Amino acid sequence: MGGNMRIDDSLRETEVLNELSRRFRQYRISYPLTQSELAEKSMVSLSTVKRFENGEDIGLIKLLQLMRALDIQEHLEVLIPDPSVRPSAYLEKECSRQRARKKKPRAGTWKWGDEE
């Protein structure tokens, strides 16, 4: 499997794991860190890093450690969003548009002398 693959409900779990592993490897390479450096920084064994990058299951805690080492742990917020924040809350944060009112001419507005 080469190229970018969209992760959706058409994929089996093993295909999702393989795609996540491929993406993670690309993040590590562009960070840039070697597998050994990542293992040391994340406090995860080198063999665990290699297993994950080969598409093997390593467990959630180890995945979290690896993500933190690459500074991508904030992406977990998308994985399981906070249920207390409703989607409509994001819309409420934006400034709501207010209806423009037609301006009424003020009494005593200034006019040129020949406009009477």
Image (cartoon, rainbow, N blue to C red):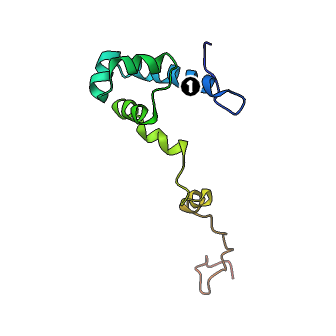
Instruction: Describe the element under mark 1 as helix, strand or loop.
Output: helix
Q: Nearer the viewer, residue 57 or 2?
A: 57
Tell me: 115 left or right of 17: right
Q: Residue at x 39, y 21 (%)?
A: 48
Quadrant (top left, top right, bottom left, bottom right) of the N terminus: top right
**Would residue 2 be seen by someone viewing this image from the given angle?**
yes
Residue shown at 67% from the left, 69% from the top: 99
Residue 83's x, y, as percent? 56, 57
Residue count near mark 1 (Cα–Cα under 10 Å), binned few <14, some 14–19, many ≥20: some
29 or 35: nearer the viewer:
35
Q: In this view, does 35 lie above or below 43?
A: above
The quarter of the image holding the C terminus is: bottom right
Q: How many marks?
A: 1
Compare residues 102 and 64 and report the one nearer the observer. 64
In the rendered image, residue 74, in percent from the top left (x then y), is placed at: 43, 41
* Residue type beneath disc 1: Leu
Residue 20's spot in the image, x, y percent?
Answer: 53, 26
Is 76 located above or below residue 84 in the figure? above
Outermost residue, right side: 10
103 to 92, vertically: above or below: below
Q: In this view, does 51 lie to the left or right of 16?
A: left
x and y percent of residue 110 in the render?
58, 79
Reading the image, the residue beneath label 1 is: 17
Question: 3 or 99: nearer the eye?
Answer: 3
Determine the image quadrant of residue 69.
top left
Asked whether, in this view, residue 7 is left or right of residue 68, the answer is right
Residue 33 visible in the snapshot: no
- Residue at x 66% of width, y 76% of height: 103
Q: Is residue 11 above or below residue 61?
A: above
> In the current view of this chain or complex, which residue is farthest to the bottom?
107
Residue drawn at x 60%, y 15% is 3
